[in-house]
Image: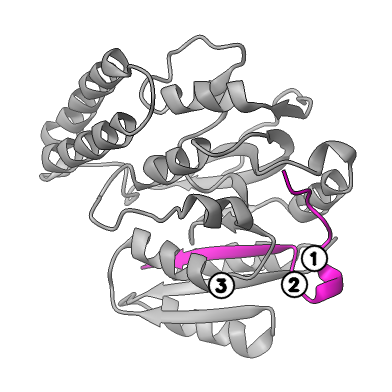
Amino acid sequence: MAQNSSPEAAGQPLVSFIVPVYKVAAYLPACVDSILAQQGASFEVILVDDGSPDESGQICDDYAEKDARVRVIHQENAGVSAARNAGLDAAIGQWLCFVDGDDWIAPDFLARFTLWFGSASAQSAQICFVRHIECPDGKIPPATAAEQNAMLDEEDFQWLLRGGLNRDLKGRRDYWKIKPATPCKMYLRDVVLQAKAQFPIALRTGEDLLFNLQLYRVTRLGAYLPGLRYYHRVWANSVSQGYDPHALEAYTLLQQRLAEFFASLPGDYTDDLANRAVLSLGFCCMLQFC
């Protein structure tokens, strides 16, 4: 396994922050400012304007004019998966970090990552999981007890594969701390390229999960870094909340894609897929009828 080495001597940024942007004009400045305030290593910010009808696109351009670390991609509206794929294709950093346009990261996020990156345990890691903190109405909740860093090996990633279908599985760790979402993770770009991982454009839900499963299949070593804090804004117009008349269709398609993915792996995932189907049915009924 190739070891990680400092990319900065060759002019490559350590991290590419990829931000899909759509109708988040009210929150985008706080998001981008939180990234640009980072210290400790070189980075780039890729803002992907997904045909947003509000002022988001202009806000992106304003940042690019003021700061050379910011690049902007404008595209016709194609959905968050297409926006993330566009950022993924443009990124040149050694590590990739997706940040949603209405979320933000802690001021010491990159400094803490850089400190860990210099340790011996970091040299073969391929994915890093950070602490995902939900912030209702944008308010940071009270701090919880500090946790220790932890390394995850190949067996852990086999558990995470199954956990994509059934998060109630009792493995050797508390996998509930690792969210299925794409933000709140750091991905070694080489492993993304190795897996040829892309976000499935046809899906309206679960695109994060399928992207991560593609990577878990090939990942051999990762890290849980709770000192790195990702703040997720929970707000009324969030995609995952509220009435959705197309929920059943969306979750049916997700279930089909999950079945296709796990059919390509060795082992029997029948019970796990059935568990996922039951949970998805309950959730989509809540979205469609409640």
Q: What's the magenta region?
A: 1-22
Q: Which mark is residue 46?
A: 3
Q: Is residue 278 left or right of residue 187?
A: left
Query: What quarter of the picture does the N terminus occupy?
Result: top right
What x and y, as percent, mark residue 67? 69, 83
Q: Are marks 1 and 2 in contact (CB under 8 Å)?
A: yes
Q: Which residue is mark 1?
A: 7
Image quarter of residue 168: top left
Q: What is the count of numbered marks? A: 3
Q: Which is more toward the observer, 281 or 267?
A: 267
Query: What amino acid type should be assigned to the residue bearing mark 3?
Result: Ile
State the residue at coordinates (23%, 17%).
274
Q: Which mark's residue is nearer the viewer, 1 or 3?
A: 1
Q: Local crowd at mark 3 within 10 Å, few (<14), some, or many (≥20)?
A: many
Q: Which mark's residue is nearer the viewer, 2 or 3?
A: 2
Q: Is residue 16 above or below residue 130?
A: below
Q: Which mark is residue 12?
A: 2
* Residue 21 in view: no
State the residue at coordinates (37%, 42%).
210
Q: Is residue 168 left or right of residue 124?
A: left
Secondary structure beneath dot 2 equals: loop
State the residue at coordinates (41%, 75%).
49
Is residue 12 inside the magenta stretch?
Answer: yes
Query: What amino acid type should be assigned to the residue bearing mark 1?
Result: Pro
What x and y, as percent, mark residue 89? 49, 69
Image quarter of residue 20: bottom left
What x and y, as percent, mark residue 12? 75, 72
Distance from Cα at disc 1 to Cα at disc 2: 5 Å
* Residue 19 in view: yes
Distance from Cα at disc 2 to Cα at disc 3: 14 Å
